[in-house]
Image: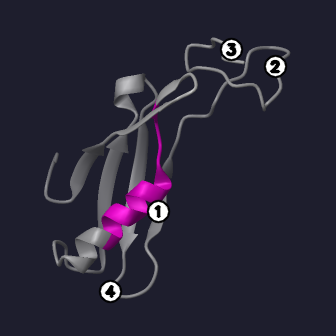
Amino acid sequence: MLGPKEFEARNLFPVGCLSEDPTTGSAAASVGGCLRELSLVTPPTRVVIHQGWHVHRPSLLLVDVPATGGIVVTGTAAEIAYPRGASATARVTPGGTRCN
């Protein structure tokens, strides 16, 4: 925890050539819902989640927690870069190594 409403998160994803997901909006929404359900925040509020630093792809997730209803996640994410000539379906590591 970086502050009362600021966290650093990691989502290990050891499948294929990825070791970690740099941005996980669904997990961020779940954190917001859990914080609200357990009364660990007072809605309406915003929680900030930093993710992706460990894989050199920093992302910032802004989690808006209303008193009722759905959690809203916005923020920034690093675009996946594909090597020249590769299709968007090619699996590529952040360093540019092809995995297929």
Q: Which residue is mark 3?
A: 98
Query: Element at badge 4?
Result: loop
Specify the amino acid type for callout 1. Val
Query: Which sits earlier in the primary sequence, circle 3 or circle 2?
Result: 2
Badge 3 crowding class, 10 Å Cα cut-off, few under 14, some 14 to 19, many 20 or more, is some
Give how far across and how far down residue 92 sits, in percent.
65, 21
Q: Please give the range of residues in magenta.
A: 20-33
How far is mark 1 from mark 4, CA to CA? Answer: 15 Å
Decide which of tag 3 and tag 1 comes sooner along the chain. 1
Q: Which mark is residue 67?
A: 4
Please give the residue where the numbered disc 1 appears in the rendered image: 73
Residue 86 disc label: 2
Q: How is the image coloured?
A: one colour
Looking at the picture, how far across and down is residue 78, in whole percent?
54, 35
Query: Percent position (x, y) of residue 84?
Result: 80, 14
Query: Is 99 on the left or on the right of 75, as rendered?
Result: right
- The image shows residue 94, relative to residue 10, as above or below, that is above
Q: Are marks 1 and 4 in contact (CB under 8 Å)?
A: no
- Of the numbered discs 2 and 4, the one sitting upstream in the chain is 4
How crowded pointer 2 is (Cα within 10 Å; few <14, some 14-19, many 20+) is rated as: few
Q: Nearer the viewer, residue 33 or 66?
A: 33
Q: Secondary structure at mark 1?
A: strand
